Image (cartoon, grey):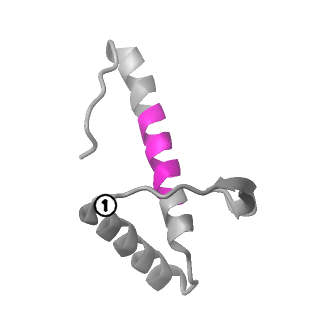
Amino acid sequence: MQHQHPGPEQGQREKAVFRTVPIPVSAFDHIKDTQRAIQARTGRAVTFNEVFALIVHEHKHHTQNAAQGARKNGPALLRPCA
């Protein structure tokens, strides 16, 4: 089943995919902490899904930038996030 879901860019609509996946408690806690911080900063309620999509979008942007820098400075290696 697919539903319309806001994308990482404000106003962008994107189809959503529903999956049941287990995540470590530490990852869940990070998402919830980020959700609370966004809500405190903006005064707007955000869903767990919106925060998860934002984190994935930011990670994608970060890894693309890292890969571009690595191409300039040698071969790219898969590195864990700090």
Quadrant of the image containing the N terminus: bottom right
SS assignment at label 1: helix
Mostly what secondary structure, the magenta segment?
helix
Q: Position of residue 68 (x, y in %)?
A: 45, 24
Q: Is residue 48 inside the magenta stretch?
A: no
Say which residue appears at 48% left-offset and 33% top-offset: 64
Q: Residues within 10 Å of mark 1 (few under 14, many from 20)?
A: few
Start-end of magenta stretch: 54-64
Q: Position of residue 72 (x, y in %)?
A: 40, 16
Residue toward you, 49 or 71: 49
Say which residue appears at 25% left-offset and 38% top-offset: 80
Residue that protrudes farthest toward the top in the picture: 74
Residue toward you, 8 or 74: 8
Give the labeled residue for mark 1.
Answer: 27
Residue toward you, 37 or 15: 15
Q: Is residue 57 inside the magenta stretch?
A: yes
Query: Where is residue 81, by image quadrant?
Result: top left
- The amino acid type, in three-letter code, at marker 1 is Ala
Q: Please tell me whether residue 52 is drawn above or below residue 36 in the rendered image.
A: above
